[in-house]
């Protein structure tokens, strides 16, 4: 889970640099549960992970190609709409994340399934590697060592000798 947490925190921090975005959090169907959720400001961005299918690699590490959807809550219908600004906000989110942590935008979609909120979804993908179960993860990094060999080699056809003259 360390890789997922690190990615979430990095993306959250990056989204917080978008001046138009007021709140950033993990997605939890906030738009459908506005009456019971902790209040948040608009525009906002909520981060959702798709299904995560890990692939085992060497030394107990794992990799995953992961999709990350940003739910951008643009405004509530009771507020004065700013339709053209919506595209600028979506573009600002895209520009802040494209290439960040290897993220590549793969899909945009207007989410019309919420009664009182205008929502846009932008989906990115990236590759993660989790080495937290690697038994050698805390060992120091090995540096290349120069090895000197002090021997003369005699090579006769298919026979290699160490220079003893025989």
Image: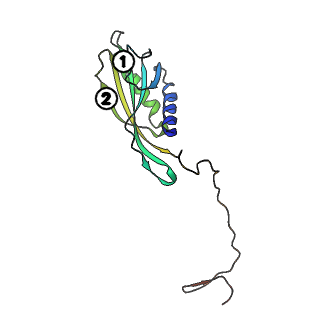
Residue 21 in the image: above or below residue 152: above
Total marks shown come to 2
Reading the chain from its start, which is encountered first: label 1 or label 2?
1
Q: Residue at x 34, y 22 (%)?
A: 119
Marks 1, 2: nearer the viewer: 1
The residue lying furthest to the right in this view is: 150
Q: Tag 2's secondary structure?
A: strand
Q: Tag 1's secondary structure?
A: loop
Counting other residues with Cα less than 10 Å from the Cα at mark 2, is it few (<14), some (14-19), or many (20 or more)?
Answer: few
Q: Residue at x 47, y 23 (%)?
A: 24
Q: Position of residue 144 (x, y in %)?
A: 64, 59
Q: Position of residue 148 (x, y in %)?
A: 69, 69
Disc 2 designates what residue?
109
Q: Taking 156 as reference, is 147 left or right?
A: right
Q: Quadrant of the C terminus?
A: bottom right
Q: Which mark is residue 22?
A: none
Q: Quadrant of residue 159?
A: bottom right
Residue 90 in the image: above or below residue 4: above
Here the colouring is rainbow
Q: Residue at x 49, y 21 (%)?
A: 19
Q: Residue at x 35, y 28 (%)?
A: 121
- Give the Cα separation between the discs numbered 1 and 2: 21 Å
Disc 1 designates what residue?
33
Q: Position of residue 140 (x, y in %)?
A: 65, 50
The residue lying furthest to the bottom in this view is: 166
Q: Taking 107 as reference, is 156 left or right?
A: right
10 and 132: which is toward the camera: 132
Q: Are marks 1 and 2 in contact (CB under 8 Å)?
A: no
Q: Position of residue 95 (x, y in %)?
A: 44, 30
Counting other residues with Cα less than 10 Å from the Cα at mark 1, is it few (<14), some (14-19), or many (20 or more)?
Answer: few
């Amino acid at each position: 889970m360390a890789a997922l947490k690190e990615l979430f925190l990095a993306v959250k921090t990056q989204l917080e640099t978008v001046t138009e975005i007021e709140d950033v959090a993990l997605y939890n169907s906030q738009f459908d549960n506005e009456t019971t959720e902790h209040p948040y400001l608009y525009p906002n961005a909520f981060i959702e992970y798709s299904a995560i299918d890990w692939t085992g690699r060497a030394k107990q590490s794992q990799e995953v190609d992961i999709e990350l959807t940003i739910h951008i809550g643009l405004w509530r219908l009771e507020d004065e709409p700013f339709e053209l600004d919506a595209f600028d906000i979506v573009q600002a989110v895209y520009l802040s994340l494209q290439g960040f942590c290897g993220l590549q935008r793969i899909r945009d979609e207007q989410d019309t399934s919420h009664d009182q909120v205008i929502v846009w979804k932008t989906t990115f993908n990236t590759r993660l590697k989790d080495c937290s179960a690697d038994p050698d993860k805390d060992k120091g990094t090995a540096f290349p060592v120069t090895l000197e060999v002090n021997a003369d080699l005699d090579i006769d056809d298919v026979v290699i000798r160490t220079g003893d003259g025989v």
